Image: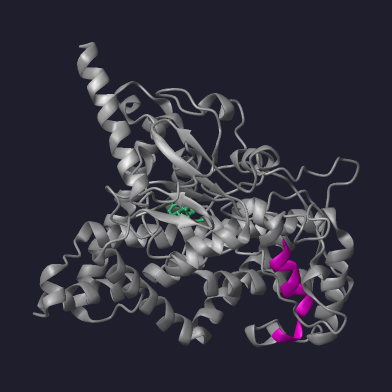
Amino acid sequence: MVPILVALLLALALLSFWRLAKGKVEPRAKYPRSLPSLPIIGSLLHLAGNPQLHLLFHSLQKKYGSLYSLRMGSHYVVVVNHYLHAKEVLLKKGKTFAGRPHTVTTDMLTRDGKDIAFASYSPLWKFQRKQVHAALTMFGKGSLALEKIICREAASLCETLSASQDAPLDMAPELTRAVTNVVCSLCFSSCYRRGDPEFEAMLQYSQGIVDTVARESLVDLFPWLQFFPNKDLALLKRCVAVRDQLLQKKFEEHKEALSSGSADDLMAALLRAKLNMENNNSRLGQRLQLTDDHLLMTVGDIFGAGVETTTTVLKWAVLFLLHYPEVQRKIQEELDQKIGFARHPQLSDRQQLPYLEATIREVLRIRPVSPLLIPHVALTDASIGEYTIPKGAHIVINLWSIHHDEKEWEKPGEFNPGRFLDEQGTQLPSPSYLPFGAGIRVCLGEALAKMELFLFLAWMLQRFTLEPLAGQPLPGLEGKFGVVLQVQAFKVMARLRAAWREGV
Ligand code: PLO
């Protein structure tokens, strides 16, 4: 045994000497600094007990620099905390880093990655995304129709606020219903009334999914855990089953309506694209197969993303307005000057209301909906900055760090919409800011989200002042980390503004 070992070592030494002599030694790869890690569990001991991963990853920069690596179970994970590195990953090398990891929970949600957000990069994925992009742009172009839908829901929201005026109100279900109805109209040409049992069921299953999916939970790190009893996984399974039933029902209805040619919503547009592809004998059509599962999961994505993200931002916006009444006052002054009380706000007012627009930007900065985005995967060996990144590495973009970088933002912890504007009220550029991600996986709903945020806030603040409950401490501003950064429940008083009380 010993002679063999010695011979082997000698051979190795000779080989390296030979390569040195030939001057062929490649520059040593420089890997990102790594957190300590143990076999099997990786760096888990450093992460355990800290549910706010975005904050932990932010603070680890002090010790490890802005780009570092760790092991989550068997996965090699690179955490990116600086915007220049983030832009390199998302924009400059977008295709190289366009992969997604398979995880137990997201596979359960998306039938093994047949959606868009959680599916890895493939020609079929590209095609799917293109179809959705086209359908959304089509509805966006006729944004008059979309604007009408949003305003209808804003009016209904204001009615509800009027009805519960001067009494403590949990706005969350009301905001959710308004946003859900916009997405429902867009996807299925349907909407929900208050107390509709299907809406209540949706609220419940969606909360269950948000609580359990894609949270870097143990079962996602150690997939074999799924074969043991697991409460969270059981909950996710139940919630996904309820969602699937609902999607299937809409799907059947649309297939019927399609033959009569009456459907013109997003689901119908995707169904038509699928049929066209099947009838089309092009080479692309023969190679790629968009199944019913793909279509259902895609609509599930748009629906889920459309509801959870926009509702969450609206809740954060209301909460920050309670904490910063002077910001609310300034928005109202702007609304009063530019719109007045004789008509409702509309999309074409956006340029006239820079302070409201800046407030929306600031909410998206200070509480990014998706603080760690969804992890990307390196599809080939690659690099970020001066660092070597091996194929298969998971890349986590820490938007929280990018949005709270003290070198880029003055007092990043303070809520200050004014930071986005110069003295003339013109919008200032902000490089360290990516609330919707960037590159080939950039959010598909950005335009829709911005329309909704603007109109819902403008309608509400034109009519109401939102106040905290008297004599009670203000609700906390800490988020709860998950697939979206959640707001804790809180109540407000919606007071009709004087001009409306006098019936002007
Ligand atoms: C929200 C709960 C729904 O029931 C299912 C769903 C679908 C798409 C997900 C969304 C959830 C959360 C926010 C996500 C979105 C896709 C893109 C978006 C992750 C889980 C973000 C912020 O990246």
Q: Position of residue 502 (x, y in %)?
A: 88, 76
Colouring used for the render = one colour
**Residue 102 location, x and y as percent?**
33, 45
User: Compared with residue 463, is residue 167 higher up or lower down, i.e. above or below?
Assistant: above
State the residue at coordinates (38%, 61%). 96
- Seen in the image, is 80 located left or right of residue 375? right
At x 86%, y 40%, the residue is 473
Instruction: State yes or no: residue 269 in magenta.
Output: no
Decide: is 125 above or below 131.
Answer: above
Quadrant for the C terminus, please: bottom right
Q: Does residue 226 appear anywhere in the picture?
A: yes
Identified at 56% across, 59% down, the residue is 85
Q: Would residue 394 appear left or right of 486 to someone viewing this image? A: left
Q: Classify the position of the N terminus by image quarter.
A: top left
Q: Is residue 130 left or right of residue 348?
A: left
Residue farthest top in this picture? 1
Q: Which residues are magenta?
A: 351-362
Question: Percent x, y for residue 446?
Answer: 53, 70
Q: Residue furthest front?
A: 21
Residue 111: x %, y % from top left: 27, 48
Quadrant hosting residue 185: bottom left
Give the vertical position of 143 relative to 212 (above or below). Answer: below
Residue at the location (28% across, 71% down)? 127
Q: Nearer the viewer, residue 113 or 472?
A: 113
Is 231 or 498 nearer to us in this picture? 231
Q: Give the dominant element type of the magenta stretch: helix, strand or loop.
A: helix
Asked whether residue 375 is in view, the answer is no
